[in-house]
Image (cartoon, rainbow, N blue to C red):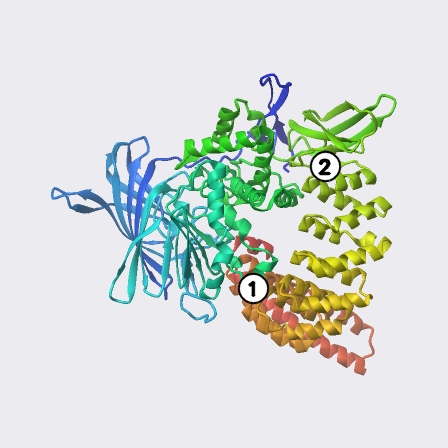
Amino acid sequence: MFKNLIYISLLIVAFIGCKPTETINLPEQTVIIEDPNKVPTRPVYNASNTKKFDLVHTKLDVRFNWEKAHMYGKAKLTLTPHFYTQKELVLNARGMDINKVQLISIGQDSLPVMSDLTYSYDSLLITIDLNKTYTKDDTLKLFIDYTSKPNELSEGGSAAITSDKGLYFINEKGEDKDKPQQIWTQGETESNSAWFPTIDSPNQKSTEEIAITVQEKYKTLSNGILSHSEVNGDGTRTDFWEMNMPHAPYLFMMTIGEFEVFKDTWRGIEVNYYVESEYAEYAKDIFGLTPEMLEFFSNKLGVDYPWQKYSQVIVRDYVSGAMENTSAVIFGEFTHQTKREMIDGSAGEDVISHELFHHWFGDLVTCESWANLPLNESFATYGEVLWREHKYGDDKAAEGLQNDLNSYLGQVQRGNFQDMIRFDYDSREDMFDGHSYQKGGRILHMLRNYIGDDAFFASLKLYLETNKYTDVEMHQLRLAAEKVTGEDLNWFFNQWFYAKGHPKLDIKYSYNDSSKTETVTVEQMQKLDIAPIYYIPLKIDLYIDGKAETKEVIIDKVTNTFTFEVPFKPDLVNFDADKMLLCEKVDNHNIEEWAFMYHNAPRYLDRFEAIKKVAKSGDEVALDAITHALSDKYPYLRRTAIRGIKKAAKNNAEEVKAKLLDLAKNDIDSKVRGDAMGALAKYFKDDENVKAILVNGVAEESYYVIGKSLAGLSEVSYEDAMKFAKNLETEENSRVKNSVCGIYAEHGDAEQHAFFIKTADEMNGFGKYGFIMTYGKYLKKQNNKTIKESLPVLEDVAKNESAWWMRMTGINVISDLDEMYKNRIHVAEKELKDMDTGSDKELELRNALDSDKEMKKSLSEIISDVKETEKNPRLRKMLGLKD
């Protein structure tokens, strides 16, 4: 934080209906004063893009030069002035060759007439002189002939979307025999203007046609429906795609590749799944819940899925997790799974529901600016929760909500607090963070809890129907909710969407036996120069004689005190009984109350919080609760109990061991079985039954169980672990490969290096990320010859991996090895000073030192080369380089 910041907090006291007086916190206004002698400056404000023209229709004709990684395009754009008269048009077009810009008019014979227009181009913008003034009642049609050259662009990106080239040629020359040739696009935030000229702004909407000419062996996918195809007689085919409903330019897409297509349907609408041929038999397993999701979301929202079809495609080397391109979603290759891999859970189900929910929130109704991104991403994140709740129940939904809270809190733990709706971002890519996604999803859950299910979904229906095919800001969501509920909701939106931070609560409980009263004191501890004093309606449950009595309270001060008459001391006072509040809290229960909460409070988060607390205590009541939690009805809570079983394993060993053995053998959830095996190896490794369980686990079908069993055997009998690891070297699953590598990193020598070299060539995606880290751990224990053999692999990762975070992993391993040799050289040189000259020991040490220096030189040279070639801003900063 800058020094000498002046915060002007505007507080308005309002009366809403017959509710108590409320303090409403407006967005914090900041004036930056760095020097008393300087004039104060206005804060940064990234406004929505001004609409001079409205896109009406985009028609593209594209074909490709794979060798050059060029796309040859012809674009016909239909536009109209938004309101004011215009005689100049500015289009976004990044790094293209612009061959021709023409006006299309209709001649006397009703045929199109093409007239050249004067324009200037600076590699980012085409500024076109229209030769006349156009009014809002006029329609303008342009033709642009151009070449897109994405691989020649200066590349940017963010943590969420790692590249902004817009158009991607994968294995364009076919040199990698293990990777298919593909072309795909990624438009968000404003990258589609790298492959077609447009007004690249989220507050534009356009219908679309695209003709894609490819070799006949390839399949294509784009927005809307495939109206027809034409075989050209030269080995190529042209597919004609049409989207007849308007959507934002960043949602335009195309994908080309040798895909197998599984055809599904929903209410007569095509629902198709595009996968690589080796996963064709699993396409239904991967995406088969899609029709049920379409039905559920349509019914829940009261607004049917609004687009012509729904397709999903998995591509190689994708630069994000997935993208909600209208009616044609792209997924990264992590989504590919076999049926056996899905025993341990779907890698993509949450993401599939997330991207589908975007087709209402983001595609049908779009944020007007990136500052309003939570209108897209918060809803999509909450869509995951709604699907979990519908399909699997409240515990599964609550687990997702808790994960979202942890993700957000992890991001802000160093003080990176942001307004949810913020116009002062440095880069629009900064909006893709834990605020727009996870915090926003939790806020929507609080709104639903406050106004009730019926009003919440009626508000969403009104919001969608009122604003369909348009762009919006957050106030329009508020107005829809106010229209439905009849209540002024500024207080809610101001403190949650237009302010930063979150409540930090200290909750104390006291019982007065003489007055028969229970008092709850709640103190808001958040820093008030960052976050507001919150207005929080919530419920408190008093557990008396085994039954919960619910009290509704409002927290609206720095300190609130609530006193309740009770017949005797409650067994538990359960603050935020609905467990809906986005907050950090210190809940001052004693261990008996935490144990009571686990056994009696009904919700997932009651049990989760209680397990976390009783795991830290050796009291008998805590040991009993954590042991019972091993049998919790929900798998993730059984896993949470396993991770917290240390004290019970020591003090209640026989009962805990028996339960863990039973879980390892019989639990229906493979991850519970695997975690139980890990706990048995950790706490009961000397028991003869444990080794047998682990050996059986290595033969299980679940890859998770195999990995955990192998790791457990490493604790119990590393000789057996090495033997089984050798037998598993041929497994193709990345989890198993990484487990084998983990065993070799712990116990292996140079003999296993060939396996690491082979695996490096076979691994990709997130699996390779973990592998490279394990590889680095292995190399630190090896001799110089082995490390030298690894350098080409590490250098290739550090320089050539397409994803910046993969290159970062390679850079980190090389840097760690470089630092290791630096320290070894320092120690050796120090030892030589005290050593007898000419002794055998001195000669041996000098030879080792020379070898270490040679290795240090090689590593430093690689780091220098990386610094010269690396263009990603994040990695350049990590490498100590300036842009």
Q: From the top left corner, tell me how far across and down residue 213 is, in percent.
A: 31, 59
Residue furthest left in the image: 109
Name the residue located 56 percent from the left edge and 43 percent from the top edge.
390
Q: Check disc 1 and give the amino acid type.
A: Ala
Question: Which kind of residue does numbered mark 2 sit on?
Answer: Lys
Q: CA distance from mark 1 to mark 2?
A: 42 Å
**Crowding near the residue tagged with mark 1, few <14, some 14–19, many ≥20 C-alpha atoms within 10 Å:** many
Q: Residues within 10 Å of mark 2 (few under 14, many from 20)?
A: some
Q: Is residue 686 left or right of residue 304?
A: right
The numbered mark at residue 585 is 2
Q: Position of residue 799 (x, y in %)?
A: 53, 64
Depth check, mark 1 against mark 2: the one in front is 2
Q: Is residue 748 visible?
A: no
Tell me if residue 371 comes above or below residue 197 in the rendering.
Answer: above
Image position, residue 58 (x, y; %): 31, 46
Name the image quarter holding residue 450: top right
Q: How many numbered markers are drawn? A: 2
Query: Where in the figure is residue 572, as x and y percent of width and height?
Result: 78, 34
Instruction: Indicate the quadrant containing the N terminus: top left, top right, bottom left or bottom right.
Output: top right
485 or 380, which lies in front? Answer: 485
Does the CB distance between marks 1 and 2 fall below 8 Å?
no
Which residue lies at the image location 49% right of the left edge and 31% below the top edge?
Answer: 458
Q: Is residue 289 left or right of residue 233?
A: right
Residue beneath label 1, please? 798
The answer, for residue 264, to whether it is visible in the render is yes
